[in-house]
Image (cartoon, rainbow, N blue to C red):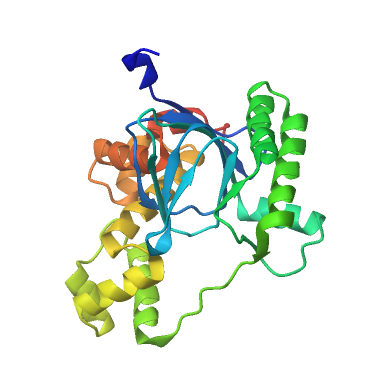
Amino acid sequence: MGTDEGRREWARHWRHAELPGLDLLRARYVRHTFPRHTHDGYVIAAVTRGVEEIGMPGGTVLRAGPGSVVLINPEVPHSARAGDPEGWAYATLYPSRGLIAEVAEEIGFRRGTPGFTAALVSDPYAARVITEVHRAAEAGNALAADTLLRAAAARMLERHAGPLAARAVRGAGAADAAAARAVLEERMADPPTLEQLAAGLGTSPFALLRAFRERYGMPPHTWLTDARVRRARRLLDGGAAPAAAAVAVGFTDQPHLNRHFTRIVGVPPGAYRRERPPA
């Protein structure tokens, strides 16, 4: 394989109009790296080529190759990059919390909100089913895609899920971190400095920074960038133009949104919006 062709990147992040509650990403990345970020819903990804390195909380690094399935719960901070010079290719499903709850109920999961208990499993059969979901959706066969999606989700829930632990707020530091997050959500377009945020909560900047990292797996400014991108996604889903979304979430301009959005989502906001069904 030639050098240029061997390092070519491509990605499609889209949603099928007849598959509510699901986003799909099929891509190959070589140089692209995903910074620490989170998702509102779940991640079920099948690596089809190469090696993906996933950075998980606590400094854990997972290496996923062909036949493996990556499972990430909502709000879990993680990063990703190539673990091989040739990069990696994968087919990813992003089911919403509601969709996973629906599948869990269908299979008789009665232990609260489901959460995956393993972040990486070797399951070539499930990996093939996940790729077949993509093929069926891309072919316009929503019936097959929905059937295969539910089969894959059910298999992962039955084999690798338990009750999703609630994040209890304990101690002053944890309470301050939660309060700081609420302020940043409310003032996303005009956030305070770390010093102002800490002063408003009656604590020190260093103590707040430490507590926020412990609770959310990233410092406040990184969390804010991720939160802005997630809110921008919701605006784009609703039909907003990228320039309007950028201003609404507090980015200085559309290029600023483009840079962070592409790093976190894997495609530029314009390409993302074009793949949304009509609002």
Q: Is residue 109 above or below residue 64?
A: below
Along the line of sight, which residue is nearer the eye, 142 or 130? 130
Spot occupied by residue 27 in the image (x, y as percentages of width and height): 48, 30
In which quadrant of the rendered view does residue 240 lie?
top left
* Residue at 34% over, 59% down: 223
Quadrant where the N terminus is found in the figure: top left
* Residue located at (35% from left, 12% from top): 2
Q: Position of residue 79 (x, y in %)?
A: 39, 49
Q: Quadrant of the C terminus?
A: top right
Q: Nearer the viewer, residue 252 or 163?
A: 163
**Is residue 273 among the parts visible in the rendering?**
no
Q: Residue 159: name its quadrant.
A: bottom right
Judged left or right of residue 113, residue 187 is left
Which of the 4 image quadrants contains residue 87?
Answer: top left
Q: Position of residue 92 (x, y in %)?
A: 56, 38
User: Quick one: which residue is furthest to the top in this view?
Assistant: 2
**Is residue 49 at least partly visible in the picture?**
yes
